[in-house]
Image: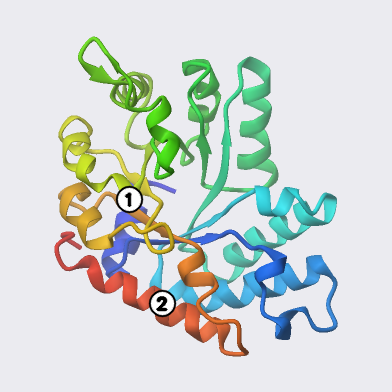
Amino acid sequence: MTTDQIYSEIRKKGSMLCVGLDTDYAKIPECVKAGRSVSEAVLEFNKRIIDATAPHCVAFKPNLAFYECLGTEGLTVLEKTVEHIRLNHPGQFIIADAKRGDIGNTARMYAKSYFEAFDFDAVTLSPYMGSETVTPFLEYPGKFAIVVALSSNPTSVDFQTAVKDGKPLYQIVMERMMEISTPENMMFVVGATKADKLKEIRSFCPDNFFLVPGVGAQGGSAEEVIANGANAKGGLLINSSRGIIYASQGPDFAEASAAAAQILIRHRANAGV
């Protein structure tokens, strides 16, 4: 998938929303669990959420931890979730939220896993071990590495904002990543709870997409993200997970998720889409 194709979906839907599929069996409505195994319930829940929210979003982001914890059955659910999106909603951008970060052949095997075996469009990566943890992911045309720059969790300040030679670490990371990539294969994670930093980050990174988690349950503001982080075309994938997929515990859970998604995309007015 190219950036032009993503921008086209953003313009068509008037949305920069990414729905995070952080599907926790303990939080799935009882009406979905009834008569189903754990893996069956997770997959059914995902399908219902995907079908309800697809008209209102441009991307889905399964968080791999919620599938890997189920063992081999969880990996099957992950595979079938991606297949469901591809078959029924082919315009969607699909992100593996894996935050992998390893060197050499290991990174190459991770890239093969997510881009070939599972057919994701992008994968989130931790760059702590250096550029060689990222370069294998840049070898796939139409695929994206999404490098963690400034995350939304409170303890990100332990390392990410440390200053060296007058620059915060996240800026050093982003500038190095931009040297080895293009906006056609590199995105960055910039947390919504750091919205005050978005304008500064956009000034030295004008063209790359930002994946912005932290809107909704974590307290981030979609309005602030758009006002500070959008570029001329939009350039944002604004993620919400719990605030959308767990909008209701009743039989109307899918309809409630669609309504929650619609509320978020109303904040697009200043985004240039």
Q: Is residue 191 above or below residue 26?
A: above
* Mark 2: secondary structure: helix
Marks 2 and 1, how far apart at CA: 18 Å
At label 1, counting other C-alpha atoms closer than 10 Å, the crowd grade (few under 14, some 14-19, many 20 or more) is many
- Report whether 243 appears left or right of 106: left
From the viewer's side, name the closer residue of 156 and 188. Answer: 156
From the viewer's side, name the closer residue of 89 and 263. Answer: 263
Q: For mark 1, what is the residue?
A: 192
Q: Residue 140 at what x, y percent from top left?
A: 52, 33
Q: Residue 124 at what x, y percent from top left?
A: 51, 39
- State the mark number for residue 260: 2
> Quadrant location of the C terminus?
bottom left
Amino acid type assigned to the residue bearing label 1 in the image: Ala
* Mark 1: secondary structure: helix
Q: Residue 53 at what x, y percent from top left?
A: 47, 74
**In this view of the protein, can residue 67 be seen by the observer?**
yes
Q: Residue 106 at what x, y percent from top left?
A: 68, 22
**In this view of the protein, can residue 185 be seen by the observer?**
no
From the viewer's side, name the closer residue of 41 and 110. Answer: 41
Q: Is residue 92 above or below residue 134?
A: below
Amino acid type assigned to the residue bearing label 2 in the image: Ala
